[in-house]
Every structure is written in structure tokens, then in C-alpha cells.
Image (cartoon, helix red, strand yellow):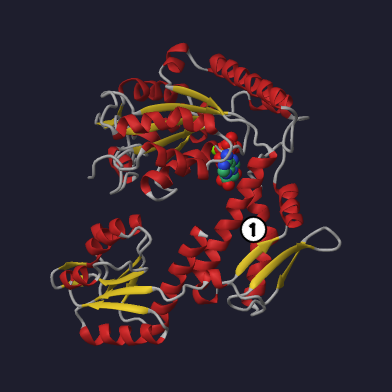
């Protein structure tokens, strides 16, 4: 397992604030604990950091945990989530820790929280595991007691008497305590421009005291004292909601580029359509929670119908406008090409000791006007790329002097922009498979068609260029 992540502190804050909009306080509290872990200075015998996230619904509490997983482990799924609502009754807690030996069927009860599960949500990149206990106010009293042990000593004793260690874990607790009262406080003010600076800072501190009072009423002081930071998420203002909409539109564009490859197109959403989506997708009740669904319903689905019925030409600009009756969006193909998305003369490194295939691919790509560096071994590749900046690398897994996955990881370090694709004649060994997943290397199984490989490279380059433009 690797040493802690190599991100520098500013990079971490920068990456996270791109993903978590309008909650700078949350990052200010959380990031120093990750830095302490990365510096090897996190105290032993306790979790790396324990955070209680409070505040109105749809303001980014769960999104924060997902974003951290993305940044630390390259996947928003790489965290262990315990829905405390599933453990409201005392007998249900056994599902979490497994029944003690001697109980009927104890062998069949696989505990949900095991050391293996904790390790399972770490990655090659980082061995810090993220654990989320969602809606802790719903937990049965015995679960709260177990939690106390985790927070205090970083250990959990399972039914079979083994222990789970949390001293390489970041623990997030979320709660809706005080949410109803917060809504009452917010209702007239929520959402679009809720007033002057002074008013909104008053609202923030009011929410904070509501949340804290509710938490103090429900949990004992010894429980609360073990929490490193209590963060009250703020209602999102118009600017933040608009930035979240931009994220969703950018994600959709990225998806179009990756999935459609050479047939991709550019989506342009007019200011009126953006307002339409914001009006439909944000509310006092649900914050930004409905925004994704609204984009899906009004943009993604109609777009998919047009693509499927061949009404959108590859490389075109697709204009999204509000329909005259104001109840939906009109999507229209303007037919204007988008040179920004077309990779121009990319340079491709191909490494394969199957010289017939190598020469065939070299010819194919040269015909597409790409510049090609073709090598039969890792050593030859390393010599040939001196002074070059390959935009993509197509690497065979089995090389005479190494393996394509390790070569790809090395290339990524030297050329972070390079899009690595692995070719393989057989399934990769699990370890290499995991590395490819974590690093985002697609694996192309041999045999493949010429169009498969060309489309895949085009898609990767288009996605890259959309992400950086
Ligand atoms: N601050 C934010 N930054 C980016 N996206 C956000 C933010 N807040 C909400 N969203 C969007 O809204 C969705 C729902 O937000 P999230 O799941 O984080 O809500 P929550 O605060 O955990 O609410 P709940 O208390 O209901 O669990 C997210 O998946 C994301 O798309
Ligand atoms: Mg949530």
C-alpha cells in the first residue's frame, strides 16, 4: 500500500472547492486534518478526523464526502457509507458488527463494518479510508455507544471479538437535527439573493446555533466532545446554484464526448435556458438536490432522443433554448462545427511487440493525420519519446521488457495530459485491473476493430480537450 497522497495542500483545497460549491467553511475545517495525515503527524489511537456535518438538505454534505473520495481515491464511490436509519432497532445493530459466536446463524451474518471493508475503500493512491455515518440521529442507542468507541479509541469490537481499526480513517457524521427549524428560519430568505451580506451572515449564525442546540439535546457531551469539527452547511445562494448547474452541464458535455467519441457535439445552453433549469431544479425544500434530475429530464433525455434518431450531426453545435410557451426546452442542431473539440494532429505513442499489429496501427493513425511514435519495447518507447509530448499512448500489457500498465503510470507522471489506453489479449491480473481503474486507463481487449481503437482515442482526446477548454 502506498504512503499518503502526494497532493499538496493548495492543490487539495483547489480541487475540492471546484467540486464543492459555496461551502468554504467546510473545507477550512476538513483539509487541515488530511494535511496532518499526509505529513505523517496525525495522532495515533484515534481517527484522523471526525466531522459532524449539519445544515439544510441538498447543500452538499454528502457531496463533500463523495468529492473527497474523488480527490483522494479517484472515485466518488470509494467510501464506506453506513445508513444509520437502517440500524434504528437494537437487534439490527448485529448486522453491522456480526452476531457473537454461539448465536444461531452467526456464521451467516457478515458484519458490514470490517477491516477488509475499510481497506476496500482505500486506493493505490492513498490509504486513508473515508467512512460516512449518515443520519446519525436515527441510530439505535447501542449504535451510538459503538460510535463513541470508534470516535474515542478508533476501534470497534465485532461480534466475533475481533477488532476493526479506524486510525487511518476520516469519519463523517451527518445529521438532519434541527433541519425543520432551519427551514422555518430560511423559508422567506432561501435561494435567489436573500438579502445583504449582513443579513446572510446573521442567517448563518442563527442556523449554526439551531443546529448545535439540536445536537446537544440529542447527544451526550462526551459524544460531542470527541468530534473535531461541527460544520453547519449554509443555504446555497443564486451564484452557487448557478455554479452547480454549470457543473452538471459540463458533466453532460463530458459524457457526450466520451460516449460518442468522434460523433460528439457541443452543447450550448442560452442564459434563458439556464434560468429555466435553475427555476425548475432548485428550491427552498431541496436545495440543489433536484437540479441533476431537472437537467436529466429537460436536457439529457430529449438530447438522447435526438441522437438516437440521427437528428444531431457529429461535430455540430447544439443550441438549447426555452420553447415559446415557456414550459420546456427546445433543442436544435445549428450545424456549426466545433473545432475546439476536434483533436488536431495528436501524437500517439503505440507500444507493442507484435510488429504486424504495430505497423498496421501506425499506418491507420498516420492516415488519420496523427503523428505516431511506434515502439516494440518499453526501453525503445522511453528513448523515442525524449523531447516529445504524446497526447495519447496505446500500450500492450505484455511487453518484452516490462508491462504496459506500469509504463502507462510512468507516462502519466511525466505527461499528466497523456491519455493512456491499455491493450491486452487476456483479462488483466486483478492488481493491474485495479491500477487501471484507479488511474482511469480503459482496457481494450484484443482482438479489436480498427474503428474501436480510433473511436476510443478520439473520445479520450475530445473529453480531455473539453475538460481543459
Ligand atoms: N455545495 C454543493 N456543491 C456542489 N454540488 C452540490 C452542492 N450541494 C448540493 N449539490 C448537488 O445536489 C446533490 C444533493 O446534495 P447532497 O447529497 O450533498 O445533499 P445533502 O446536503 O447531503 O442533503 P441531505 O441532508 O438531504 O442528505 C448533489 O449530488 C450535488 O449534485
Ligand atoms: Mg446527504
Residue 426 shows in this picture: yes
Above or below, comparing residue 46 to residue 433 in the picture: above
Above or below, comparing residue 220 to residue 309 in the picture: above
| Residue reaching furthest to the top | 221
On the picture, is 323 further left or further right than 282? right
Q: In which quarter of the image is the N terminus?
A: top left
| Residue reaching furthest to the front | 387
Give x and y (percent) for residue 60.
56, 38
> Front-most of 291 and 173?
291
Give x and y (percent) for residue 288.
64, 43
Residue at 31% across, 42% down: 5
Instruction: Report if the beta carbon of the residue with label 1 is closer than 8 angstroms to ligand 1.
Output: no
Image quarter for ligand 2 equals top right
Neighbour class for label 1 at 10 Å: few (<14), some, many (≥20)? some
**Mark 1 element type:** helix
Residue at 50% across, 39% down: 64
| Residue reaching furthest to the left | 401
> Front-most of 153 and 319?
319
In which quarter of the view is residue 386 placed?
bottom left
Residue at 44% across, 68% down: 461
| Residue reaching furthest to the right | 325
> Front-most of 452 and 262?
262
Residue 430 shows in this picture: no
On the picture, is 324 further left or further right than 169? right
Give x and y (percent) for residue 10.
41, 38
- How many numbered badges does the structure rendering display? 1
Give x and y (percent) for residue 334.
70, 74
Q: Name the residue under label 1.
A: 296
Residue at 28% across, 58% down: 414
Amino acid at each position: 500500500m502506498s504512503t499518503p497522497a502526494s497532493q499538496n495542500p493548495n492543490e487539495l483545497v483547489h480541487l475540492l472547492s471546484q467540486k464543492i460549491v459555496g461551502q468554504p467553511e467546510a473545507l477550512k475545517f476538513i483539509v487541515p486534518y488530511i494535511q496532518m495525515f499526509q505529513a505523517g503527524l496525525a495522532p495515533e489511537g484515534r481517527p484522523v478526523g471526525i466531522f459532524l456535518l449539519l445544515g439544510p438538505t441538498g447543500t452538499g454534505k454528502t457531496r463533500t464526502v463523495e468529492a473527497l473520495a474523488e480527490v483522494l481515491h479517484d472515485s466518488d464511490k470509494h467510501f464506506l457509507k453506513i445508513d444509520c436509519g437502517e440500524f434504528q432497532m437494537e437487534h439490527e445493530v448485529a448486522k453491522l458488527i456480526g452476531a457473537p459466536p454461539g448465536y444461531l446463524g452467526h456464521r451467516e451474518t457478515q458484519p458490514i463494518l470490517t477491516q477488509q471493508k475499510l481497506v476496500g475503500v482505500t486506493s493505490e493512491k492513498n490509504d486513508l479510508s473515508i467512512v460516512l455515518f449518515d443520519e446519525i440521529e436515527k441510530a439505535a442507542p447501542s449504535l451510538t455507544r459503538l460510535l463513541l468507541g470508534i470516535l474515542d479509541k478508533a476501534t470497534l469490537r465485532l461480534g466475533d471479538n475481533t477488532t476493526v481499526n479506524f486510525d487511518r480513517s476520516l469519519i463523517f457524521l451527518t445529521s438532519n437535527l434541527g433541519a425543520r427549524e432551519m427551514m422555518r428560519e430560511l423559508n422567506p430568505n432561501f435561494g435567489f439573493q436573500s438579502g445583504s451580506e449582513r443579513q446572510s451572515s446573521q442567517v448563518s449564525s442563527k442556523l449554526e446555533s439551531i443546529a448545535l442546540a439540536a445536537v446537544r439535546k440529542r447527544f451526550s457531551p462526551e459524544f460531542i466532545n470527541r468530534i473535531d469539527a461541527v460544520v453547519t452547511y449554509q443555504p446555497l445562494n443564486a451564484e452557487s446554484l448557478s455554479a452547480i448547474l454549470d457543473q452538471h452541464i459540463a458533466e453532460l458535455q463530458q459524457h457526450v464526448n466520451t460516449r460518442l467519441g468522434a460523433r460528439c457535439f457541443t452543447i450550448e445552453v442560452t442564459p434563458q435556458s439556464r434560468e429555466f433549469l435553475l427555476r425548475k431544479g432548485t428550491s427552498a425544500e431541496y436545495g440543489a438536490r433536484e437540479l441533476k434530475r431537472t437537467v436529466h429530464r429537460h436536457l439529457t433525455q430529449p438530447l438522447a432522443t435526438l441522437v438516437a434518431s440521427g437528428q444531431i450531426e457529429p461535430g455540430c453545435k447544439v443550441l438549447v433554448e426555452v420553447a415559446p410557451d415557456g414550459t420546456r426546452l427546445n433543442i436544435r442542431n445549428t450545424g456549426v462545427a466545433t473545432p475546439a473539440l476536434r483533436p488536431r494532429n495528436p501524437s500517439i505513442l503505440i507500444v507493442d511487440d507484435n510488429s504486424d499489429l504495430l505497423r498496421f496501427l501506425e499506418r491507420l493513425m498516420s492516415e488519420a493525420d496523427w503523428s505516431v511514435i511506434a515502439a516494440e519495447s518499453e526501453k525503445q518507447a522511453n528513448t523515442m519519446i525524449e523531447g516529445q509530448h504524446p497526447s495519447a499512448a496505446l500500450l500492450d500489457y505484455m511487453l518484452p521488457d516490462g508491462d504496459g500498465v506500469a509504463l502507462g503510470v510512468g507516462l502519466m507522471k511525466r505527461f499528466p495530459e497523456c491519455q493512456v489506453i491499455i491493450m491486452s489479449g487476456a483479462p488483466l491480473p486483478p492488481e493491474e485491473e485495479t491500477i487501471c481503474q484507479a488511474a482511469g486507463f480503459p482496457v481494450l481487449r484484443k482482438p479489436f476493430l480498427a474503428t474501436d481503437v480510433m473511436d476510443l482515442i478520439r473520445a479520450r482526446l475530445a473529453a480531455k480537450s473539453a475538460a481543459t477548454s
